[in-house]
Image (spheres, rainbow, N blue to C red):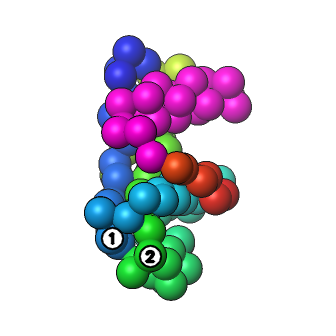
Amino acid sequence: CSTGYIMFLKQLGNKQANIRIIWLHGWSQTHSSLLQLSGLFDSEVENYLIDLPGFGGSPTPDTVWGILEYSKALIEWLQGLPKKETYIVG
């Protein structure tokens, strides 16, 4: 990513499914806070649980990030995924 920050992610569920859910954790949380909830959909969808930059397994940005920077990083990452119906839960 041109932002220079790779987000840690865990890919679970049915990778052949036509639907993908991206799970975004809350502030001061990590992807693990959503593991149990996302597991309810494992047989029907492809789940991506990510740690946003500065949280969990993702590196901390060199500058203070706000909503704009996190949004840009997420959009850039999403553009690299194969096309598929995608929902974001956060």
In the rendered structure, which amino acid carries the disc numbered 2? Glu
Question: Looking at the picture, does residue 9 appear above or below residue 47?
Answer: above
Q: Residues within 10 Å of mark 1 (few under 14, many from 20)?
A: some
In the rendered structure, which amino acid carries the disc numbered 1? Asn
Position of residue 38 measured from the top left corner of the image (x, y, whole percent): 50, 74
Q: Is residue 41 magenta?
A: no
- Report whether residue 68 is seen: yes
Q: Quadrant of residue 47?
A: bottom left
Residue identified by numbered label 1: 14
3 horizontally vs 10: left or right: right
Whether the residues at callouts 2 and 1 have beta carbons within 8 Å, the answer is yes
Quadrant of the image for the C terminus? bottom right
Position of residue 15 measured from the top left corner of the image (x, y, whole percent): 29, 63
Nearer-the-camera pick, 64 or 16: 16
**SS majority, magenta:** helix
- In space, the residues marked 2 and 1 are separated at their CA atoms by 6 Å
**Total marks placed:** 2
Question: Looking at the picture, does residue 41 appear above or below residue 56?
Answer: below
Quadrant of the image for the N terminus? top left
Position of residue 78 measured from the top left corner of the image (x, y, whole percent): 46, 35
Residue identified by numbered label 2: 44
Nearer-the-camera pick, 11 or 32: 11
